[in-house]
Amino acid sequence: VVVTPDLAGNMGRVAGLFFGIAVYFCVARHTRTKTGWQGSLFLWILTGMGVALLGTIGTNWSTTKNCGLNSLLALLPIRLAGIPGIESGINPNILAGTLLWIIPVTLLAGFALLSEPGWFINKSRDRKTSFWQIFGWAALLIITLVVTLGVLVLSQSRLGYVSIILTGLLLLVLILRGRARWWMIGLIVLDVISAGVLIWKVGWGAILSEVIGSLPVDEAAFSLLSIQQRLEIWSRAIWAIRNAPLTGLGMNAFPSAMYTIYPSFIYSPGFNLGHAHNELLQ
């Protein structure tokens, strides 16, 4: 707060930080009991469903990557516009990044329901009541997983796709036990080596041309421009951290500081950068 250049204009950011800290300790306190754990998970699932449904009516969808999704995206016009901060609609990459917090927890809750159903059942000797409790949780988790994964696919966020695949593989390694875990690790290593050899022998360009020719996607889906843009933003964020390691630049100061202290070669000063495009660096 002391180092924030425009404190009056960024009190919302400060309030959001304190609100996040309050929510964290609230969840940490209430999840010590089974009832609190169930309630917190239920609210989390409902929040994820709400984010996904809000995304279907408020996202400014990209139509330059997957031609096969354009007809479906045409049925989802922006109905929420003009909201401060997202005047032109929700960015699909931001939507995908938010869903990446929801999907793994939902998936793990599903595995927990299979392996430890007692956590989802309140004290009851009635088998019928216990069955309906488990059935209700299963239906809620399945519907949430389908909806959130579907909206993630519609976002066409390539890094979102890569992130959820890597997260899924990591969860499989953590969940499996004994020989199954080592078999999974071996398969992942073998796949990585095979992919590396294929790229080395055939070439990245030849592989991309084959993929583009066989799938209903545009060349923009495989453009490396966004990677270059992110690398430039990340490098500026690292410089900012080095310059102010203790306090940071101040609340919401990075977007303007990038143009005044760490000039960009890709972005023009009038572009609203928003953030560091990396949650760890942010």
Image: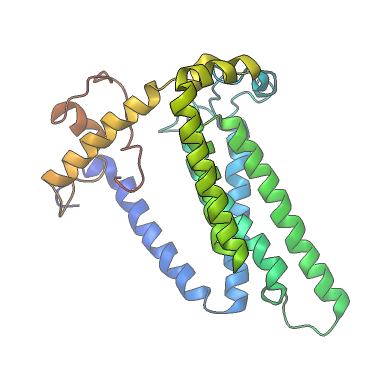
Looking at the image, the residue that sits furthest to the right is 128
Residue shown at 84% from the left, 75% from the top: 129
Residue 231's spot in the image, x, y percent?
30, 31
Q: Is residue 120 above or below residue 194?
A: below
Q: Quadrant of residue 153?
A: top right
Q: Identify the residue at horizontal 67%, vertical 49% (top origin).
A: 145
Q: Give residue 40's position: percent from left, percent from top.
A: 57, 66
Q: Coloring scheme of the render?
A: rainbow
Side of 249 relative to 148 (left or right): left
Relative image position of residue 166 (x, y in whole percent): 51, 46
Most foreground residue, 223 or 133: 223
Quadrant placement of the C terminus: top left
What residue lies at 37% left-to-right and 62% top-to-bottom? 21
User: Toward the viewer: 214 or 118?
Assistant: 214
2 displayed left or right of 108: left
* Residue 66 figure quarter: top right
Q: At x 79% / y 83%, what residue is drawn?
A: 124
Of residue 61 and residue 164, the one placed in the foreground of this image is 164
Task: Tell me where residue 248 appears, x and y as whole percent.
Answer: 18, 48
Q: Measured along the vertical axis of the image, is residue 88 above or below residue 54? A: above
Pick the residue in front: 60 or 114. Answer: 114
Residue found farthest to the bottom: 125
Total residue callouts: 0
Q: Is 235 placed above or below 168 here? A: above
- Residue 251 at least partly seen: yes
**Can residue 176 be seen in the rendering of this structure?**
no
